[in-house]
Amino acid sequence: MKIAVCIKQVPIGISTVMDIEKGVLIRISSDSIMNPWDPYAIETALVAARQTEGRTVAFSMGPLHAEKILREAMAMGINESILLCDSAFAGSDVYATAYTLSCGLKKAGPFDLVLCGQQTTDGDTAQVPYSLAKFLNIPVVGWVKKIEKLDVEGYSVLQEISGGTMRVVGKYPVLLSISKEAAEPRVPTLPNRLKAEKSSVTLWGLKDFENQNPQCYGLKGSPTRVRNIFTPSFDVKHPLIIESVQAEAAMILEGLKLISREVL
Amino acid sequence: MEFEVISKKYESYLMDESRLSGQGDYIVFPKDTQALSAALRQARELGLSVTIQGGRTGIAGGAVPKGGLIVSLEKMDRILSIETSQEYYGLRVEPGLTRESLLHFLLRAAPPDEWDKEQANMLLEMKNKGRYFFPPNPTEASATLGGMFATNARGMNSFRFGGTAEHISALTWICWDGSAWKIQRGEYVFNDRGLTLPNGKNISLLNRTKPVIAALNAQKGMDLIDFLGGSEGLLGVAAELVLTIRPVPTNGWGVVYFFESPHDALALTQIIQDRYNSTDDKSVLSAWDYYDANVLKLIRDNQKTMPALAEIPEIPQGIQAAIYCEMEGNDEENLEAVLMEHMNCFLETGGREENTWAAGSLTEMERFRILRHGIPELINNEVDKIRQNFRAFHKTAVDFQWPVTCVEDTFTRYHEDLAKSGIKGFIFGHIFENRLHVNFLAHNTEEIKAIQELMMDWAHGLVQKDGIIGAENGIGKIKRDLAVPLCSPERKNHIMRVLEAFGVEKEFI
């Protein structure tokens, strides 16, 4: 079985600076990490590979230094890594990101199982898995909170839905977007870590794809623009003066009762 | 200055993380150096004893008041200015600034509004060069810089970076009579005749006398700033400190080694120590901490419920000890070569490859640091649980500095004595420097008595080997009864003379 996992390098903390003209986020942090949801997708891939004697490939779309997170993925046990890196890919929205990833997956595939982290901390739309599945023309199950079965026959997962949980059972191919409840990511051992530092990461750019029209990628290929990002402000009309712990607790209780009355 | 009478709303100011509680008559929150100076002058005129407080995160009871005036420095929390000299930058800060706020400032914050353009540009220049940090990293993020200086707080990387005082290049010191001294590193240094203070008084060296405690340990070549660091509020207060900020190394590794026996952890430590001592390059290893089986069980039992620990996988079963090691440097290849060497040594001591965890960047290492930082909090929770039924118990721990040449003796003594006593204890910390923490739990007065006997027995052995009591967390109020009886008459006299030179008007001993 062939298993793909898509991961992303994100800045530490949340970037709140944007280029209003271009409608894109400006990454002001010099430190980056693997998107916190992605280790859960990687772990799911590794467990699936063990159960199916499958082979795993990690993909990431990003600048050259995103190679770092691909090495982390290999340190966890991923067999192969491919970095989709080209200046033409810069400024991608959900649609363009998903399209670019699909080009990489189609070139390296076909894959039976594709895994993504549920969302990222920077864009935070949680939409790429669905768009990617559409471009790959495969079913998608989002918000997977538990893997009940992932073997050569198919899968059975629990999906978080509004007001409850749904069991989804099916056969491959499928794309699953994985939440943090679904797995417990392993920590790489020291030997695996050292080995991953020496492993090679495959680099693909626009020229490696079948469709080499730059209008289909990056900012040019993005139908959406971020208009603005702002933190809503709240006017404090009633400053609180706290007399004692008991008074504070009583005030909080009253507030909770008020909120629950309004919600219900 | 107006001193407020202590009322119910200031209850939390009567205790610190040691869980010891005290009493106070008045409290004041000075906002700057002048106000602090005025408060101390006024307290002296009124004959009030004074307790200085920062974040109240100390675990030796140093910030717990025993009547008189509480001076809380929490409102003195500004970052006043930046300066630069060659490779390093200096930040002038007030003592109430927390370590967390400093970290945030170094990582993310813009220049304060009150800074002028030149200062703002210097800060931006620093940030454009890369990340900078302040090396001492005690586990408590809400510890204040003033408190860190007062206890000469160290942290996990003390092995490489030492204590807080070493990273202070200048300070403004307020004496108990309210007078202010501006001290630059290198300006006042102990020589053969001792040291003459800014007030003209002289302090002699502590010559061939066993120091017993880290504080007031006057040695030739020691800077006055290092002498004041760790003086635990006996000699005055730091009103401003200039912190030396260093560039963060470009590469870092954190590795956890798991052992099926504590003695394997000791064996690996001794091998690495031998290699470290025989090499000229001491720049790479920056932490080597030990965790015993009880600590690991505590972490395992709380991993699902403590959010900070939830990001870490479950500690493997059957593991009886762990070592957490950190290495940092700019030469990636050198770091990896040293790591391979360590890995081979680990395998030689019976370790298994799958019993390692590795983080290959400074950011990933934060996950493992959470383990280390979570331990005191977890132990505090255990203490609090006991206190629900047994109020007399408070945080009880030792942080003895034994000679680094007898790691095996200390290690064996702690493990065997604890096992023999039947008392529940947690052994963890700086095994490389032979400065392990032992935290005890007691459920009744008999157990408290047994702990005190054990601590006293260890302390006696420690002093015979010229070791130090309260090497990391200070003496405070909790360890006074342990430390003072072990001080020789010469040591006590030296301490009294130092206090006189600083104009301290109280009985220390």
Image (cartoon, coloured by chain):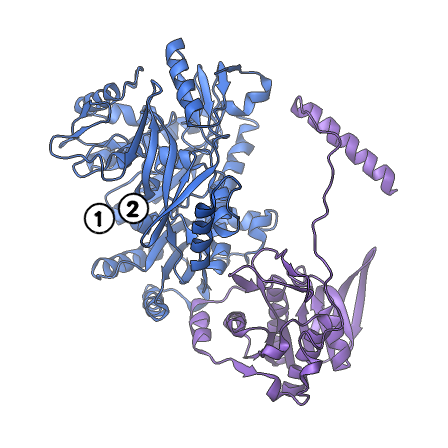
Chain colours: A purple, B blue
Above or below for B465 versus B450: below
Above or below for B7 versus B17: above
Instruction: Name which quarter of the figure residue B50 lies in.
Output: top left
Tell me if A42 is positioned left or right of B36 in this view: right
Give me the disc on residue A246.
none
Residue A201 placed where, x, y %? 51, 80
The answer to the question of whether label 2 and label 1 lie on touching residues, with beta carbons closer than 8 A, is yes
Instruction: Name which quarter of the figure residue B311 lies in.
Output: bottom right
Residue B348 placed where, x, y %? 32, 67
Residue B102 placed where, x, y %? 47, 44
Residue extending farthest front: B117
Q: Chain of mark 2?
A: B
Instruction: Give the residue pinned by disc 2.
Output: B434
> For the image shown, how many numbered marks are present on the structure?
2
Residue at (23% x, 34% y) in the render: B463
Residue neighbourhood size for the residue with mark 2, other residues' Cα within 10 Å, grouped as few (<14), some (14–19), many (≥20): many
Which residue type carries mark 1?
Thr
The answer to whether residue A48 of the structure is visible from this angle is no
Residue extending farthest bottom: A210
Above or below for B14 versus A99: above
Which residue type carries mark 2?
Asn
Tell me if A215 is positioned left or right of B60 in this view: right
Question: Circle 2 — which element?
Answer: loop
Residue at (31% x, 30% y) in the render: B231
Q: Nearer the viewer, residue B471 or B87?
A: B87
Give me the disc on residue B405.
1
Q: Chain of mark 1?
A: B
Tell me if A126 is positioned left or right of B21 in this view: right
Residue B265 placed where, x, y %? 35, 56
Residue extending farthest left: B192
Residue extending farthest top: B46
Q: CA distance from mark 2 to mark 1?
A: 8 Å
